[in-house]
Structure formats: structure tokens, C-alpha cells
Image (cartoon, rainbow, N blue to C red):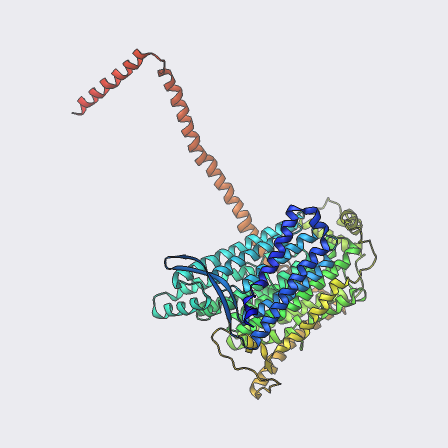
Amino acid sequence: MEMLYQYAWLIPVLPLLAAALIGVGLISFSKLTNSLRRLSAIFVVSVMGFAMVLSFAIFWNQFQGHAPYTQMIEWAAAGDFHLSMGYVIDNLSALMLVIVTTVAFLVMIYTDGYMAHDPGYVRFYAYLSLFSSSMLGLVISPNLVQVYIFWELVGMCSYLLIGFWYDRKAAADAAQKAFVTNRVGDFGLLLGILGLYWATHSFDFGTIGERLQQLVESGALSGAIAALFAVLVFLGPVAKSAQLPLHVWLPDAMEGPTPISALIHAATMVAAGVFLIARMFPVFEEIPTAMNVIAWTGACTAFVGATIAITQNDIKKGLAYSTMSQLGYMVMAMGVGGYSAGMFHLMTHAYFKAMLFLGSGSVIHGMEGVVGHDPAYAQDMRMMGGLRKYMPITAVTFFIGVLAISGIPPFAGFWSKDEILGLTFAANPTLWLIGWVTAGITAFYMFRMYFTTFEGQFRGKDVGIANQIKAEQLQAAGLAFGPGAMNPQELLVDPIADNHDAHDTHGSHGHSSTPHESALSMTLPLILLAIPSMLIGLAGTPFHNYFEAFIHPPGEVVEALQPGFHNLPAEELNEFLVMAGNSVGISLIGITLASLMYLRHKIDPAAIAEKIPVLYQLSKNKWYFDDVYNVVFVQGSRRLARQVLEVDYKVVDGVVNLTGLITLLTGEGLKYLENGRAQFYALIVFAAVLGLVIFSGVMS
């Protein structure tokens, strides 16, 4: 089996070669490469399939107890400085390889149906392959330098994919927003890496943790400085995993095609941040200040993300804020020392969130035939309703995902979220309370999403709702309707018909009166993802926690599990039942409220919003983060730029212009002394000598 590990480097390299080959083809032979659409897709999917099979083989060997495997080469050396590159295969990297390759493989199959009519079909597959390769390279990196290289590649690929439809201003702006926001976190990560190397003279994860602890204990390094370095490193995951306050890029990233939304939110970019916290756990766990910062950041992110998701009408943005909230759970778990619990939730979340996003893409795909290709209509849940009748496979799989994320047993999300809440309660009851309330809010907004989308009557032809959406678009763009202006209802006669006329670019997408179920290439990945969404949580039950036995902090010894069901001691069983009962109870309360408001219509949501306008506006305006950032950073930087321009124009340019003017005037004056007469030059020399003699005489 050693040969299997010796060729593990093929897992990230093969998708990279596939992306490079298609990229060269698109640059050199654009028409030919674009004409080989299906062949290119089969090639990329096959390569990822091979990487997935290899990943499963490695994972099985690790599960059977194979020792970690490291392959290194010396990359650079100068004096005492040595930098090695290579790859490491341990339990954590084996798990991440399986998660990334399985989700990427299914997303690539799904893409064939979703992007079938897009002219950038081949280019999208090249980007997907490069994105997957970058994430796979990151998870097997053996040191911080190599992690940082792939970290930046992941960020670059996200920029390309979020802005894939770059001719749409919203997509181009979202790509720039993601890129700039992540640069803030990445700069902090870089400073943290440099600080840790300065202190420990190492980029190796385990070595950094050991030496940092020794330095702090011996007094050679201040604990505050060590905490500063750890928090700076944590800034990288804060941006990548959309934690407060660098979360603002994630909802806007929905401007990219839905397959990449699924890949970003499930197994690549946002998972990279949680993975780095796990890799750096030997460093963080010895610094209480850093652990507190991590835990509270995660808890606040989970709560804020959930409260914003309540009022979202765009189905993809609702899921985006749910991702932000669930990532907060993972980060909070890491902060209270729940290494295994955080990674367990990362795994379960990867599968049910990928299914939810791909399910939303199936819904959007079906809606486009009715309302056109404008995302303002195709993605707005107010235009949906009753889709279960038209899209049964999508509805059933989406419902499974909703049950999983809401923490309903025995679905996957219940086991992982319950473990996090149990550990948090033991560490800090206040953090548990935040997580517990968030669990109820999560169940509420996810069932609101399901009921609004799949139950009730279909509203895709409701011109009144379409006019309301159009009016909101115009108001968001700054077009207010004053007292003397036309009423929006008068101005917007039939935006759905206008949308069809403006966006009819896909000949095979005829206008229809009802949505349709998606093709097999899109529904098959949904069905396959539904299986782990239901069952994979059973790997981490308190009765037989295979996951914790496999994934645990470095250096921690965990007793191997014996096959079979294990009875919990009475005290532990009671504790589990109480904690599980609390989490399920609050989820059921959220589900009941969602049912009364959006299924039974016994409670009017608008009436509640009128009674709590401050809280409603706080949620609707996303806690005003974007507004504050716009005033402070966007407009503030523009004001600063204008002031710098004034200084540049009046001071810097003024000095240069003054120097030029003096030179010009001096030249103009001296040119009259240059008349070509030797006698005149001799007179000037005589006068200069005479003046010098007189000056010398006076001074003496």
C-alpha cells in the first residue's frame, strides 16, 4: 500500500493538468476547443473521478490504522534557512480529500445539465478543475508556506468563478468584493505566518505549536505576542470562512453560477478556513485568548447569519447566510476545544449544503422557463410556490437537506450540531445559549424556504408580485417614486414578459406556463447527495463515535472502538437526552412557527414585521454591515483619494512646476549673456575676479 501513498500527489495534480490542457486549448484553438464541449466535460469529470477513487483508497487505509505518510523535497536553502515542499497524508487530510473530491465530482456532473446552453461551458469546466485542484493541494500541504500558496490559488479561482458572467455588473462587482475582502484576511494570515516563523524558526504545524509553548513557558516570548500571532493567523479563516466582520462577500458570491455556489459553500473555499483552524489547532489550543476569540467569533457569526437569513427572499442568498451561520457553529466548536465536533459538522454540512445549493439551482433552472433568465425573478421565492407538484425529485431531496440542517434526528445535521452544542454547554453556557437560539432560528428560516418554494400555489405568473420585485430593484438602484411620480404599478405593466424578451438567449428554453423537473444529470447528484445527508451522521453518534476515533487533535490518544452498539452510562445517556431534547425542541418550535406563517397562513408575517420594525429592518438590511463599510471604507477611501489627489496636484506637482519655471526664467535671463563675443566673456571673467578680490579684502 505504500505505492498508493507515493502517488497521492496525483490527486491535486491531475485536475490541475486537465485545467491547464483545456485552458491552453481555449487560448490557442478557441473555436475547436469550444466545439468539443461534451468531450471536455467527460475528460474533466473522469479525471476528478480518478482522484476521488484514489482518495477513497487512501481514506480506507487511514481508517484501518495506517501511519501518517509524508513526502518532502528541499525547495530552497540559504544558510540556516531551509524550506521543504511536499505532501502529507494523515487522517485529517484523508477525510478532506474524500469530501472535496466527492462533492466536486457530483458538482461537475450536475454542471453538464445546468450550464448546457451557456457559451462558457468549456471555460467553466476548466475553472472548476483548477478550483478543485487548488483545494486538494491545500489539504495535503505539510507547512504554512505551501498552505499559503494554495490558499491564494483558491482565492484566485473564486474570483474567476464568482465573476464568471463578467458581463453582468453585479457579478463583476461581487467578484471584486470577494477578492478585496479576502485580501484583508490573507494579509493578516501572512503577518501571522511571518510572526510565527520569527518566533519559532519553523513553518511546520506541529513544530510551531511545541516551540511556541516552550517559548511562552520559559518567558522568552510574551503570551500577548503569541496570542497576537495566533489571532493574525485566524484572520485568514475569518475571511475565507465568512466570519464576522469579513463575511460580507459570501452572499454576493451568489452572482456566480449555482454549481460553483455549491462547491464554494460545501467543500472548498469556506471549508478551507475551518480546515486551517484544525491544522493550526496545536498552536491555538495552548493560547486561551486565541481560543476565546475563535469561539466568540463563531458564535456571533452563527447568530447574525441566521437572523439575516430570516428575511431573505432570494433562495440562493438565504442559503448563503445559512452557510455563514453553520460555519459559525464549526468555528465555535473549534474555539471551545471541540476539534472532532467541528470537523464532523464540516463533513455533514458539506453534503447536505451541496445538495441544498444544487437543489436551488434545479429550482432556478425550472423557473427560468416560466419567468425568464433574470435572477431577480428566477431566484425570488415569492415567485415560486407549489413546485413539489412539478419537481418531485428536487422537492424530496431539498426537504431532506432542510431536515438535516434543522437538526432533526436521525439526519446528519442532528448528530454533528448536537455534539457541538453539548461541548459548548460544558465550556461556556452563554455560548451554548447563542447556539441553541440559533438552532431554532435555523429551523424556522429553512422551513420558511421550503414552504415558500415547494408548497402552496404556484405564483410564477403573478404580475403583482413581479411588479413588487421590480419596484424593489428600482428603489435599490436609487430610483425613488416621489409624490408627483408615476405609481410603480402603472410603470411596470408585465415585467415577466419584458424579462422573456430581454433574456431569450437559449433557444431550447421555450416559454412555459409551469416549471419542469431538471434533467437526469442534475437530479442524479441530488439523489446521491441525499444518501450521506441522511446516513453519514450515524458515523458520529454518542453510542458509537467512529468519527471521533478517527479524527482527533494531534497527539491525543483515543481508544480504538470495538464493533457493535455501545450502551452509554446512565449519566452520559441522560445528559445526551437532555441536550438533544433541548436542541430538537427549539427546532420544532421554529418549524411550527414557519408552518403557521408560510404553510397554514394562520399568522401574517407582515403584521409581525410591523410590530417589530427595528428588528425587521435590522435583519432586512443585514445588520447594516454593508452600509457601514460603504460609508467608512468605500466612500472614506474615495474621500482620502481625492485629498491625496489635491496634495499631489497642488504640492507635489506645484514643486515640480516651480522648479521648471525657475529653470525657464534662469535660462531666459542667461541667454542674453551668451552673445558669442570673446571680449564680453573676458569682461565677465574680469568682473568676477575683481569681485572675488574685493570680497576677500573685505573679509580679511
Image spot of residue 70 (x, y percent) = 50, 68
Residue 520 quadrant? bottom right
Residue 129 quadrant? bottom right
Image spot of residue 567 (x, y percent) = 60, 87
Please report the residue visible at 55 percent of the width from the left and 66 percent of the height from the top: 274
Judged from this view, the residue extending furthest toward the left is 700
Classify the position of the N terminus by image quarter. bottom right
189 on left or right of 609: left
215 on left or right of 449: left
* Front one among 414 and 517: 517
Image spot of residue 639 (x, y percent) = 52, 44
In the image, residue 575 above or below residue 216: below
* Front one among 503 and 2: 2
* Front one among 668 and 385: 668
136 on left or right of 450: left
Can residue 311 be seen by looking at this rendering?
Answer: no
Residue 53 quadrant? bottom right
